[in-house]
């Protein structure tokens, strides 16, 4: 049986990418996905069979887009410190651009949503292992202080990426004047490209070995 026309699978994926940051996996309604895509519910089941399969494909598409750029930035002949810098900037920008989705996924993981847990288990190690390898290389070359890898990763990822998630929390709470400033004033201080690069440089500087 030939596939239906109009690329209904792509329309549904696009709808899922739009809705998941609002609903998370646990709150995602298949009827709403179909309505957002402008197709009937039967087309959803024709293309994806189950909600589990659908959310898996949506989340993987989002992640693979990030991981492609992340991998390119961490390759090449630059020093491990410069490649680590690029990796942290890419990770922070990904956290910024998907901060609403991150918050909903975190909620789903905490609640034990099976597909959210599976996604995290399969994908978090992919980019974290690259960051860990670059940290090891920096330490071996005397560019970074010797410290346990989990501590270094937690410090670098936390100080560079987490403020972007914090911005998502501020937005979700509809805070009118976080830090005593209007949202439009806070955004460039927390989530602009310049702010991200500055945090990455400060974090790497904090872990740099003296004289490196």
Image (cartoon, grey):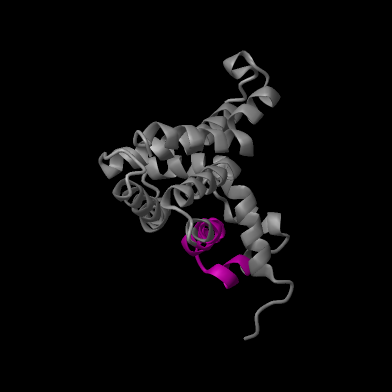
x then y, percent, for residue 192: 63, 35
The stretch of residues the image draws in magenta is: 43-70
Nearer to the camera, 111 or 85 = 85
Residue 142 painted magenta? no
Most common secondary structure along the magenta stretch: helix
State which quarter of the image contains the C terminus. Answer: top left
Q: In the rendered view, does 134 fall on the left or right side of 52?
A: left
Residue visible at 62% across and 49% down in the picture: 19
Q: In the rendered view, does 6 fall on the left or right side of 167?
A: right
Nearer to the camera, 203 or 68 = 203
**Residue 162 in view:** no
Q: Is residue 139 above or below residue 171?
A: below
Q: Is residue 135 above or below residue 41?
A: above
Residue 57 painted magenta? yes
Q: In the rendered view, does 11 fall on the left or right side of 123?
A: right
Q: In this view, does 84 lie above or below 77?
A: above
State which quarter of the image contains the N terminus. Answer: bottom right
Residue visible at 49% across and 38% down in the picture: 161
- The quadrant in which residue 169 appears is top right
x then y, percent, for residue 9: 63, 68
- The quadrant in which residue 183 appears is top right
Taking the view exactly as shown, the residue that stands out farthest to the top is 180
**Residue 74 in view:** yes
Q: In the rendered view, does 134 fall on the left or right side of 176?
A: left
* Number of disc labels: 0
């Amino acid at each position: 049986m030939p596939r239906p026309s109009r690329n209904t699978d792509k329309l549904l994926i696009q709808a899922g990418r739009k809705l998941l940051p609002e609903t998370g996996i646990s709150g995602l309604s298949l009827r709403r996905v179909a309505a957002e895509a402008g197709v009937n519910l039967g087309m959803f089941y024709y293309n994806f069979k189950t909600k589990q399969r659908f959310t898996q494909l949506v989340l993987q598409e989002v992640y693979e887009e990030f991981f492609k750029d992340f991998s390119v930035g961490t390759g090449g002949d630059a020093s491990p410190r410069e490649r680590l810098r690029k990796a942290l900037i890419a990770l922070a920008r990904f956290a910024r651009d998907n901060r609403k989705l991150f918050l909903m996924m975190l909620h789903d993981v905490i609640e034990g949503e099976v597909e959210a847990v599976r996604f995290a288990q399969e994908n978090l190690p992919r980019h974290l292992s690259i960051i860990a390898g670059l940290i090891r290389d920096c330490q071996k070359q005397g560019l970074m202080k010797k410290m346990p890898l989990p501590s270094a990763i937690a410090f670098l990822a936390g100080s560079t990426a987490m403020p972007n998630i914090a911005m998502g929390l501020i937005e979700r709470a509809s805070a009118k004047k976080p830090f005593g400033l209007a949202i439009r004033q806070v955004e460039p201080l927390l989530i602009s490209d310049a702010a991200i690069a500055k945090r990455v440089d400060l974090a790497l500087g904090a872990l740099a070995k003296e004289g490196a």
